[in-house]
Structure formats: structure tokens, C-alpha cells
């Protein structure tokens, strides 16, 4: 979130372009979880850029949709305050959408019982929300969480697009930004430019939805002090 000379730096150009386009929804795609239950590097990176984008869009704050399950091992991780707040917010959203009063009550109680320091299976969506929350001033955190939606079932890029579609349709958004990052291929064979694949998947899933789409990739680190934006 910079202006003036900072926005003229190369690594701020994509954020400046996003601010000009003024999306009213930002879908942030998970980048994997570690076997320990902690978020992977790409997941953390995307949460950081979500905070940077949100800061640049303060004049018209968007809704953020964090998308991804990702914790295949179901490993438990101890939660700090940001983790606990994001997990509780996700569970409360699930409670609000529950089809039965008994499920709604059970999920509400579960959300109320989530505590700092407790161990929990974290999803990519939870982890990215928590990264973003830590990067946000304390006075703005409640307002930020009120603008966050969670999609914590998807395990592929196609499912990211498919499972977030009902959220985007319900929100009647006009401009949806898909936020992701390049994924390094194994054995030094370059990078998978995930923003391209993700945008294609979201275009296919839109099927007449009334919103424009764009995608932006986080910077990929190519060496000490060298970053390339895509």
C-alpha cells in the first residue's frame, strides 16, 4: 500500500494497476500446506499480497474470498490470535449457512470454543486470512474480518473456481480479481504461471455471471534481491 515514489517502483506496479481497476471482490487462492500443518510458502506469500492489495484499496474496500483446503495430512497446528479469529469466523459463516437448527447450534458452539493456543487443523483459507490479519492494524481487524468469506473445500484450481462461484454470485460483484502466484516446477524447470491457469478456470466457471474477471500473480523470487512480477 504505497503511493508517490513507492508506486513508481517496479514491484508496486501491479498493485497500482489493481487499485486503478478497483475490484469489489478479491479471490485469493491457496498455495499448499506443509506436512506439519503450517502454511506453505506460496500460501503465506498470497496472504501477504492480499494485505498489500487491501491497503491500496482503502478508498473502496473489497470483499476477500480465501479459497483452499490443502491440509491433506490433517496435521494439527497451535493457533495464535490471528489463526483463532479466522478459524472462528469461518466456522460462524458455516453456522449461518447451516440447513438445520441443530447443526447451526453445534457450529456456533464450536466457534465460541475456539481458543488461542489450542491445536487445530488449519486450512489454506484460514492460514491466508491469518497472514492478512497479522499485517493489518489492530483497529482495522474487525472491519476486515467482516469483509472476509471462506471457501475451505477446494483442493484444485478448478475447484477454487467452482466452489467460489456461489459466493461471487450471491455477492453480485462487478469486478473480481483472482490473486495467486507462480509455482516453481520441480528440478529447476521454470515456473508454472498459475495466474493464467486460474483465470482460465474462473472464466469457464463464470458461465454468464455478471462480473468482469482479472488475475494477478505475486512476485516470484529468482535469486537474492531479484523478483519478477507476473
Image (cartoon, rainbow, N blue to C red):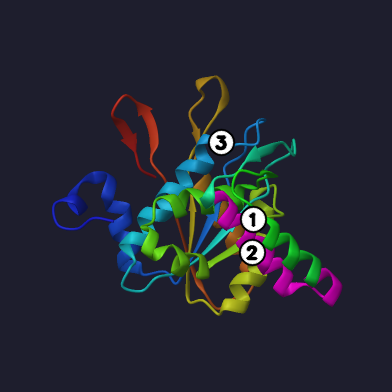
Q: CA distance from mark 3 to mark 1?
A: 17 Å
Is residue 90 within the magenta segment? yes
Q: Is 109 placed above or below 152 here?
A: below
* In front of the other: 20 or 55: 55
Task: State the predominant SS element of the stretch in magenta.
Answer: helix
Quarter assignment of residue 153: bottom right
- 208 versus 42 height, above or below: below
Q: Which residue is mark 3?
A: 40
The reply to whether callout 3 and callout 2 are in contact (CB within 8 Å) is no
**Residue at (43, 50) in percent of width and height:** 134
User: Residue at the spot x=44%, y=62% of the render?
Assistant: 141
Which residue in the structure is indicated by mark 2?
A: 164
Vertical placement of 174 versus 126: above or below? below
- Whole-angstrom CA distance, mark 2 to mark 1, is 6 Å
The range drawn in magenta is 83-104
Sequence order check, earlier mark of 3 and 1? 3
Amino acid at each position: 500500500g504505497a503511493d508517490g515514489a513507492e508506486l513508481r517502483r517496479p514491484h508496486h506496479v501491479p498493485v497500482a494497476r489493481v487499485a486503478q481497476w478497483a475490484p469489489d471482490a478479491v479471490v485469493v487462492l491457496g498455495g499448499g500446506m506443509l506436512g506439519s500443518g503450517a502454511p506453505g510458502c506460496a500460501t503465506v506469500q498470497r496472504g501477504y499480497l492480499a494485505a498489500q492489495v487491501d491497503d491500496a484499496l482503502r478508498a473502496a474496500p473489497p470483499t476477500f474470498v480465501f479459497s483452499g483446503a490443502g491440509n491433506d495430512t490433517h496435521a494439527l497446528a497451535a493457533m495464535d490470535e490471528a489463526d483463532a479469529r479466522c478459524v472462528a469466523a469461518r466456522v460462524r459463516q458455516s453456522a449461518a449457512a447451516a440447513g438445520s437448527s441443530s447443526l447451526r447450534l453445534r457450529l456456533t458452539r464450536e466457534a465460541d470454543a475456539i481458543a488461542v493456543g489450542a491445536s487445530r487443523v488449519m486450512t489454506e483459507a484460514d492460514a491466508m486470512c491469518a497472514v492478512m490479519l497479522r499485517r493489518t492494524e489492530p483497529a482495522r481487524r474487525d472491519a476486515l474480518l467482516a469483509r472476509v468469506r471462506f471457501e475451505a473445500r477446494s483442493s484444485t484450481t478448478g475447484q477454487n473456481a467452482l466452489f467460489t462461484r456461489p459466493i461471487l454470485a450471491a455477492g453480485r460483484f462487478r469486478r473480481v480479481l483472482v490473486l495467486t502466484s507462480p509455482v516453481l516446477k520441480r528440478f529447476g524447470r521454470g515456473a508454472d504461471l498459475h495466474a493464467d491457469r486460474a483465470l482460465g478456470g474462473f472464466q469457464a466457471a463464470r458461465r454468464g455471471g455478471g462480473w468482469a474477471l482479472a488475475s494477478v500473480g505475486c512476485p516470484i523470487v529468482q535469486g537474492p534481491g531479484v523478483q519478477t512480477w507476473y
